């Protein structure tokens, strides 16, 4: 394009009781990956939407969506022989591939609206198992590339918060908990700080491992894509203690690629010894409100994603760092509490 202009705003807008202003601006940054450009500078377009505070909705959580539009002349010939989807290899820019955690079994290809309060999903099987609760291994839940949408009159209305595990209830105020409640193991689990290196068959979980480990899988990668992960990312979770109890917390997270029925785990590049668990701990876990935590991910030894494979996430609560608490709870699949996995890549990404 040439001769284009950007109106910086602010441009006011209103839809129902939701109103605010839109701002637009450009930034310039160097693009060292563009070997055959007239110069090595690229433009970044930023659109900022600032919502005014409303009585029904209160202050809304900040959200950010990013994406890069590739320059068709940006040295694509530098792709390795045989690759089908890389863009600007060796460049400095990375694209965050974002997956929002949902309450939908991965036997579906798209997010479904949460049906309301329900028993804990047993997510320790494969997608073809479909939804199961209780001791039967069922489909992992879906992590999807689109965030939850507002319902019940729009985003200016309070959104429903459901209980995703009515069979894991606190002793006090059992009807007031929402989200997913994950228990701590009954006994100590061997591994890295109490997080097992093989979450597919950990000891110490007794006969109800689905109360301690929860799995999510992305949609299946379509044909024609060869996705290489850059090795960095972040897991953002909305969490708090169960029943407002005051104690510490430690969680374990695992990333893996599922090809067929085989799971290959990422190695935590920050943990000596080749451990697979990514660990996050606080001496005082959030207890009086849903609070967002940020788990940095520096991974190695994770294969790329090709046709038919899926990216996976497992979440568990570690015993020693959470005692005397009985577990922690997590909220997701709700517009204001958008728990999500962001993983960086330079590859061309599919649209699910």
Image (tube, grey):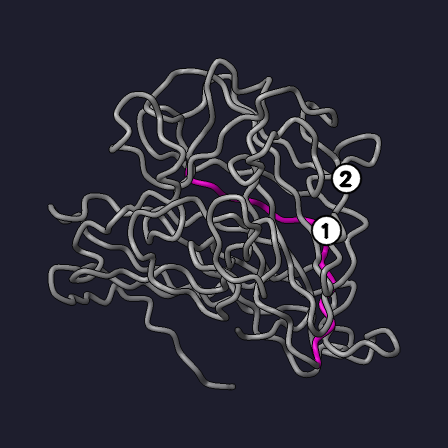
Residue at 50% from the left image edge and 71% from the top image edge: 109
Q: Is residue 235 magenta?
A: yes
Residue 274, quarter of the rendered image? top right
Tell which of 174 and 220 is nearer to you.
174
Above or below for 21 versus 281: below
Residue hosting label 2 = 269
Residue range corresponding to the magenta coloring: 224-238
Residue 313 in the figure: left or right of residue 265 = left
Above or below for 169 versus 25: above
How would you classify the magenta stretch by its main secondary structure?
Answer: strand
Residue 243 percent coordinates (x, y): 33, 24
Q: Residues within 10 Å of mark 1 (few under 14, many from 20)?
A: some
- Secondary structure of the residue carrying numbered label 2: loop
Q: Residues within 10 Å of mark 2 (few under 14, many from 20)?
A: some
Residue 304 percent coordinates (x, y): 76, 62
In this view, the residue farthest toward the bottom is 2
Q: Is residue 222 magenta?
A: no
Residue hosting label 1 = 231
Residue 107 percent coordinates (x, y): 52, 66
């Amino acid at each position: 394009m040439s001769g284009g202009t950007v109106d910086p705003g602010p441009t006011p807008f209103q839809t129902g009781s939701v109103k605010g202003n839109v701002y637009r601006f450009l930034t310039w940054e160097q693009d060292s990956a563009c070997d055959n450009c007239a110069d090595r500078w690229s433009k970044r377009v930023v659109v900022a939407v600032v919502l005014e505070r409303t009585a029904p909705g209160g202050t809304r959580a900040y959200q950010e969506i990013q994406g890069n539009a590739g320059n068709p002349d940006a040295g694509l010939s530098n792709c390795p022989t045989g690759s089908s989807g890389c863009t600007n290899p060796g460049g400095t820019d990375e694209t965050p591939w974002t997956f929002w955690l949902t309450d939908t079994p991965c036997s579906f290809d798209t997010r479904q609206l949460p049906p309301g309060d329900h028993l804990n999903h047993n997510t320790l099987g494969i997608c073809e198992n479909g939804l199961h609760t209780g001791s039967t291994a069922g489909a992992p839940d879906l992590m999807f590339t689109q965030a939850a949408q507002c319902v019940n009159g729009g985003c200016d209305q309070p959104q429903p918060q459901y209980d995703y595990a009515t069979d894991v209830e606190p002793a006090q105020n059992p009807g007031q908990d929402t989200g997913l409640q994950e228990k701590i193991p009954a006994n100590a689990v061997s591994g890295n700080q109490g997080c097992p290196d093989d979450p597919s068959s950990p000891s110490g979980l007794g006969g109800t491992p689905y109360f301690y480990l929860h799995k999510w899988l992305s949609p299946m990668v379509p044909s024609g894509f060869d996705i290489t992960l850059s090795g960095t990312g972040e897991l953002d979770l909305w969490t708090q203690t169960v029943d407002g109890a005051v104690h510490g917390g430690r969680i374990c997270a695992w990333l893996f690629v599922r090809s067929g029925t085989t799971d290959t785990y990422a190695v935590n590049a920050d943990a000596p010894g080749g451990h697979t668990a990514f660990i996050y701990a606080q001496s005082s876990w959030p207890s009086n409100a849903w609070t967002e935590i940020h788990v940095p991910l520096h991974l190695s030894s994770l294969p790329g994603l090709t046709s038919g494979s899926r990216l996976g996430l497992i979440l568990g609560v570690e015993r020693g760092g959470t005692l005397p608490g009985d577990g922690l709870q997590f909220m997701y699949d709700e517009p204001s509490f958008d728990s999500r996995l962001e993983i960086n890549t330079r590859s061309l990404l599919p649209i699910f």
